[in-house]
Image: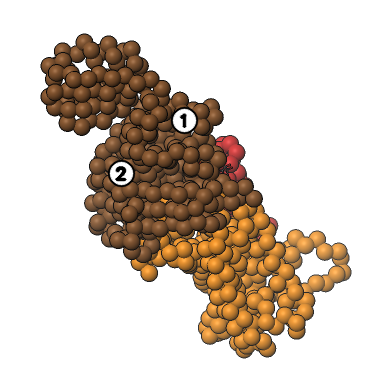
Chain colours: A brown, B red, C orange
Amino acid sequence: MGLIKTVGLTKTYNGTNAVDGIDLSIKEGVCTALLGPNGAGKTTTLNMLTGLINATSGTISFDDRYMGDRRKYIGYLPQYPKFYGWMTGEEYIIFSGQLAGLTKKEALSRSDELLSLVGLSEDKKKRVSGYSGGMKQRLGIAQSLIHSPKLLILDEPVSALDPIGRREVLELMKTLKEKTSILFSTHVLHDAEEICEEIFIIKKGKLIIEGDLVELQRKYQKPTIYLNTEEPIEDWSTTIKQKEWLRHMDVKKNKITVTVEDMDMAREALLTDESLRKLKINSFEVAKTTLEDLFMEVTGK
Amino acid sequence: MEEILNELQSVRWDLLAPIAIVSFVLMIVAMVDCFKHGKTNGPQWVWILVIVFVNLIGPILYFIFGRRSE
Amino acid sequence: MKQWTILFKKEFKESLRNFKWVWIPLVFILLGITQPVTSYYLPEILKNFGGMPEGVIMEFPMPTAPQVLAETLGQFNQIGILVLVLAFMGVVAGERNSGTNIMVLVKPVSYTAYMLSKWAHMTLLAFVSYLSGFLIALYYTYQLIGSVPASDVVSGFVVYTLWLLFVTTIVLLFSTIFKSTAAVAALTLGLSIILSLLSSITPELMQWSPGMLASHSYYLFQTGEANDGLWLSVVSTVLLVVAMLSISVYIFKKKEVATHTS
Ligand SMILES: Nc1ncnc2c1ncn2[C@@H]1O[C@H](COP(=O)(O)OP(=O)(O)O)[C@@H](O)[C@H]1O
Ligand SMILES: [Mg+2]
């Protein structure tokens, strides 16, 4: 059973379907990306999931272990979060917490926790109107987490940010996915590949591709190196985490799947890596085409 | 002349003074907000002039039309 | 109830920070001072500086205390209501247009509580402003002209409060229906002016109308007695307020929160 499941979800605006019969199933404990170009219907879909707009047709069901109003179990960060600029960051988080049912005391201690998690402790007494775009985005994430939601929905959380802000937020999401299920939308495949396990690609309101990211990558033959070693490879894998040619990796005991940015650099680096050689390489396989190629093709760029 | 002076003395200044006080307070509050809040529709200095020089209704005009909400 | 309190406190704090809780009461206080003062000094000013042609003898009778109170309510009815409507035209539309309501309503918040907190706060601010202006006017009238029996003052005051309540509820309703705050202001002012005008032109036909309340409260100041039809317009106003509140909440629930996605 998925955490949230839709069947034939459709939203019609002035006779055209912004979202057109989408079946989603978001698994618990998994990070899922909703991927699609601008205007694909991502925001519209998420707005229906959160109950901010009503579906024209189709159904949405939330895990029946969690009873009642599903807003209690969902944390949401809109694409363009709008705050009450006259509040301080801390006031906003406490206000959000109280709305979500926390007592003032609970909200206060939880806000301390979250503001330090998103790195806003120093600025928490400042008015939100003076926050930068990146700070607002992080404050938005903090408010979405205030009631420890089962599902965190983030609408294009990094699209409006500069490279540094983008990195900060992506790192934050990596930490968060340890504790809560995440569904986030993006128009950049790279972001999805970096943190997600599952993806749904939509275009013009329709679902085109869905499934496990690694499987899809394999299926659509990405620039990937499959490595198989005699010895366990987990410890070694941390040494390449920061390499600029690395895109994504998936480690299982003595198997590693390395999706790379630049095949030549990666191949060169791996084959000359002494410590890797010590693990006794069994196989070293290189694949060519990419999921990105496919994504570009289906999204028509 | 004498007559006018008498009349002036009969005016209840104690009751008229609060008008000046209240409009002064309004002006100060509007000025403080205009500087602190900082976001106005149109140039800020124009609103400062309006607040200071448009008697009584200047500050009110500022709060209704001049102040841009966040 | 708990959420209602949180939302109400937020409204209150917001209006403290943007000084609505300061300047709106001050406007009513100013009106409450200036009206009795002008009523008192106007005859004298006209006598001294009127520049009347020779031989024309004009009498400028000093107004009575109940008249001055009624004139003050007349000021509240024009400038006071204008100010209240302009200050609150965005009470619902503002947050919708800016999108600040989204992160609030995506929390497990009751839409009814959201609307009622806004209405209650706006009405409270209007009432406190009116009360302060009225008390000042009463003091000035007493100092300059004379007193009015307390019971007449109270009943007249309460009846006019209902009219203000009616106006703030229209603001809420229109601010829920329309996106444009200018439209909210224009329609609210238009409707309240039409109701008041019709009530003074054809009182017989408008007995039920909330627009009669102001003249009922003048009558109470003057005579201490209820004019014909007072109860009818009181009851119909209360019913209209309840109806408009329910309609506002209903419309708000039906409208989608996220109006645009970009
Ligand atoms: N309120 C609305 N009225 C009319 N059309 C809308 C509305 N909201 C979204 N749309 C349309 O629906 C489509 C999907 O929009 P959106 O969900 O914002 O896409 P995305 O978030 O993927 O960029 C777009 O073509 C957009 O113009
Ligand atoms: Mg979008």
Chain under numbered label 1: A
Secondary structure beneath disc 2? Answer: loop
Q: Is residue A286 above or below residue B40?
A: above
Residue A8 horizontal/vertical position (percent): 49, 53
Marked residue chain, label 2: A
| B19 to A186, vertically: above or below | below
- Tell me: C155 left or right of A222: right
Q: Residue at x 75, y 84 (%)?
A: C204
Tag 2 residue: A30
Q: Amino acid at mark 1?
A: Phe
Front-most of C22 and C36? C22
The circle on residue A295 is: 1
Element under disc 1? helix
The residue lying at 52 percent from left, 38 percent from top is A203
Residue at horizontal 43%, vertical 27%? A292
Question: Is A272 on the left or on the right of C220, as rendered?
Answer: left
